[in-house]
Structure formats: C-alpha cells, structure tokens
Image (cartoon, rainbow, N blue to C red):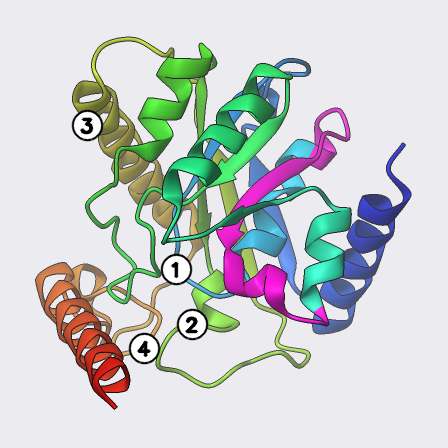
C-alpha cells in the first residue's frame, strides 16, 4: 500500500471524470505483473505523465516512477508530492546520478517511466530518441514496455491554450509488447523507435476522425501541426534562444 500514490490516483481519476475524458486502454496485459521494466512513453502534451500510469494501475495496480526534471522537485507545491510518490529527479547538470538512480529502481523491481524523445513533440509524430531508455534496460536486464498516448495534446500542449474544462476529449493509450533487453544501445533504441512509430499509427487508426486543419492533428493526417522537420527546427531555435539567455545572464 502506498497511501500518497493511491490518493493522487483517486484525485486524478476524479478530475478526469469532471473533465469528461474518455479513456480507451489497449494492451495493458503486456505490462509485467512483477519485476522491473522501462515504461517508454511518447510525449505530445503536458498531462502525459498523469495518463501514462493508468495501464499499469489497471493491470495489477502497479505504480510507475517517472523521471522528471529537477525543477518540478524544487517547487514548494509539486516537490513534496513528487518525493512522496518516489519519482526520480533529473538534474541536467548531473545526469549520471539520475540515470544510476533509475537503474537501481529497475533492479529493485520498479516500473520506471521515461520519455525517449526528451521533450514534447510539436508535430505529434515520434521524434528521434535519446538512448537512455535502452541503456537502462540493458544495464538492469529488464524489458522495455512501449506506451503510446494519443489525444493528450488536445488537453494541453506546447504553444496552445489549456483545455482543462469539461472537454469530453477521448484519450487512447496503447501498450505494445515488451522488448527484450538485447543488442547494443543503438540497435535497441532503433527497435524501440520503430515499434512506437508503428504503435502510434495503429492507435491513430483506432482513434476516430482527425478533422483537417485542426491544431492537434499531424500534418501527415491533414492537420495544421508542423511537420516533424519543421518542429525539429522550432526546437533547435528555442534551444539556441535559451542558450543565448543563459550566456547573457552569465555575462551580466
């Protein structure tokens, strides 16, 4: 029993009900009922992490320990909650410590949630992956369980207003079959990327209509979201602007 985590789940599900969110979860039987696993999740919106633990909870009431940036833990509001739920802070200045903590969690039999894209995909396609998920799986000897969430970007995503009221948004979550920790970090990362792209397309096919011109619909499906290449260019420009601001602060 984990009273803090159970309370957060109860509150979250109550809020989802008030919002009228309609969840369809497929493949939760692919989540191991015991032992560690890397839960790899695509990233399209700010609320992804609240939805990504649902399949594990439905299948054996397991909890996912998410890797989240250190700033969330530094907050007086969210910090105590994140620590109580035993999530893992990621300090970009000391990434090795965060990585090692995640490996130890996995070796102890925990589910560790990671976003291989490392940031929200503005195109809502699957971006290029970092190799951290694969390296964790290989070092700890646990499988990777790919999760794809579709529809979360309609609630709140980068560059668009929040839609946190009673929106009745459908959200589909597909859990693919576990991927064994085999090969090199590069080959395993490539395998994971291929599986998640295929799972995303399958999830989109089952989701329902994707109206032309809508912001949440990928360009590939006729929406107004930027293409993957355009989104990558936007991310690079944003990163360059952040670096310039940091440099300016350092010189002041």
**Distance CA(mark 3)–CA(mark 2):** 26 Å
Of residues 24 and 1, the one drawn nearer to the viewer in this rendering = 1
Camera-side residue: 80 or 182? Answer: 80
Residue 190 circle label = 3
Query: Could you say whether the residue bearing mark 1 is in a helix, strand or loop?
Result: loop
**Residue 179, can we see it?**
no
C-beta proximity under 8 Å, tags 1 and 3 = no
The disc at residue 110 is: none
What is the x, y in percent for residue 94? Answer: 39, 46
**Numbered range of the magenta stretch:** 57-77
Left or right, residue 95 beside residue 107: left
* Comes first in the chain, label 1 or label 2: 1
Q: Is residue 110 left or right of residue 227?
A: right
The residue tagged 1 is: 44
* Mark 2, residue position: 157
**Label 1 crowd (10 A; few <14 / some 14-19 / many >=20):** many
**Quick check: 76 left or right of 233?**
right
User: Are circles 1 and 2 on residues that touch, CB within 8 Å?
Assistant: yes
Picture quarter containing residue 143? top left
């Amino acid at each position: 029993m984990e009273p803090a985590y159970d309370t957060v789940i109860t509150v979250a599900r109550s809020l989802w009900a008030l919002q009228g969110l309609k969840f369809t979860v497929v493949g939760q039987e692919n989540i191991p009922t015991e032992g560690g696993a890397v839960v790899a999740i695509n990233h399209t919106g700010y609320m992804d992490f609240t939805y990504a633990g649902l399949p594990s909870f439905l299948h054996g009431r397991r909890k996912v320990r998410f890797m989240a940036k250190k700033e969330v833990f530094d907050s007086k509001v969210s910090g105590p909650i994140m620590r109580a739920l035993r999530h893992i802070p990621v300090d970009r200045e000391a990434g090795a410590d965060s990585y090692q903590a995640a490996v130890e969690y996995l070796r102890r039999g925990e589910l560790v949630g990671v976003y291989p894209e490392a940031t929200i995909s503005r195109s809502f396609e699957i971006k290029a992956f970092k190799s951290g998920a694969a390296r964790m799986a290989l070092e700890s000897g646990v499988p990777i369980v790919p999760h794809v969430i579709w529809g979360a970007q309609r609630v709140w995503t980068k560059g668009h207003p929040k839609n946190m009221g009673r929106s009745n948004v459908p959200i589909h979550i597909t859990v693919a079959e576990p991927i064994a920790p085999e090969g090199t970090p590069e080959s395993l990362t490539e395998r994971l990327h291929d599986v998640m792209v295929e799972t995303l397309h399958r999830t989109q096919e089952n989701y329902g209509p994707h109206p032309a011109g809508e912001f949440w619909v990928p360009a590939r499906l006729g929406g107004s979201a930027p293409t993957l290449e355009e989104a990558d260019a936007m991310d690079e420009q944003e990163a360059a602007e952040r670096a310039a601001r940091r440099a300016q602060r350092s010189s002041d």
